[in-house]
Image (cartoon, rainbow, N blue to C red):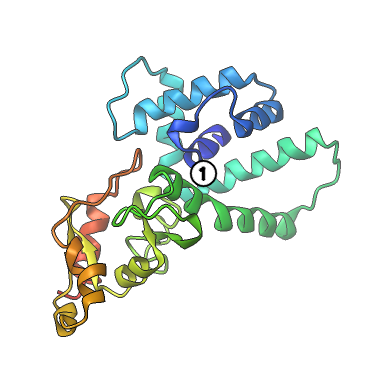
Amino acid sequence: MSAFSLYCRMPISEISPNNAEIIKFANLIGKTPKEVAKRFLNFSKIESTKNILGYVENENKEILASFTENWGKSVYESENKIIDFENKLKNIKEFPSGKERESIVKSRVNQNFFRDAVLSSYRNRCCITGLPFVELLNASHIVPWAIDITNRLNPHNGLCLNALHDRAFDRGLITIKTNYMIDVSSLVNNFLDHKSVKNYFLRFKNKRIILPDRFLPEKSFLEFHNKNIFKK
């Protein structure tokens, strides 16, 4: 399960026995980098939005099914395991327990997993503009974080957006339809005299987003945003 957590954060194109993160993780769990990379590639055959051919072992299908049944619980448990691996490697015998440990694990999960999983799936590019500056990119929740606790960490509930379009999406000025086409609120028409409005919003209307390599946006989440957040 901890292997799938790391896989989610890693761009598919970077899966290799020579990848530094894979080497580090392999050392933690007592596997070879080649074994870990093979497992990651098996995951990619299941989750990828591309047609990746090849046999997928049943064990990997079961891991994925178990993990995605409850993203929050699975990410938390996998981070717990990784901490155990790290402490064992460092020969730390007394790691904080109880609420202190829970706080540390939750902090690591909340700060890293969702953003890493979403951005890596979009190859660190805004799905509307293609902007590649990571410092200006956000992992945007389709169904707001405060509304759906179950899917807070589900990458299928995420879009990689630049800071401007992230804010516009959050405020309902833009939406992504279930066919992955961009729609723009009629409220924007009040500012047609401004060239910047045309450049940053209207030029993208009815264009398709850049689709991710995996974790395609769930259509039911997009439909929720269309109906409840978007200001038509």
Residue 92, compared with residue 24, is above or below; it is: below
Q: Is residue 80 above or below residue 162?
A: above
Query: Which residue is pictured at 85% across the width and 36% down the height?
Result: 91
What's the amino acid at mark 1?
Ser
| Viewer-nearest residue: 123 or 108 | 123
Residue 171 picture quarter: bottom left
Query: Residue at (65%, 44%) from the top-left corner?
Result: 80
Give residue 206's quadrant in the image: bottom left
Question: Dividing the picture into quarters, in which one does residue 230 lie?
Answer: bottom left
Q: Is residue 57 left or right of residue 99?
A: left
Position of residue 216 measured from the top left corner of the image (x, y, whole percent): 30, 44
Q: Quadrant of the N terminus?
A: top right
Instruction: Determine whether the residue tagged by mark 1 lies in a helix, strand or loop.
Output: helix
Residue at 46% in and 62% down = 136
The extreme front residue here reads 195
Q: How many marks?
A: 1
Q: Which residue is mark 1?
A: 74
Which residue is at the front of the view, 101 or 202?
A: 202
Q: Work out whether residue 116 or residue 199 is closer to the camera in this orientation and state it.
A: 199
190 over 213 or under it: above or below: below
155 sits left or right of 193 in the view: right
Q: Residue at x 70, y 43 (%)?
A: 83
Characterize the local packing of mark 1: few (<14), some (14-19) or many (20 or more) Cα atoms within 10 angstroms: some
Q: Position of residue 197 (x, y in %)?
A: 23, 75
In the figure, is residue 14 to the left or right of 160? Answer: right
**Which sits in the foreground, 205 or 181?**
205
> Residue 221: x, y in percent?
27, 56
Q: Residue 48, image x and y in percent?
A: 34, 33
Looking at the rendered image, the quarter that the C terminus falls into is bottom left
Q: Is residue 60 left or right of residue 51?
A: right
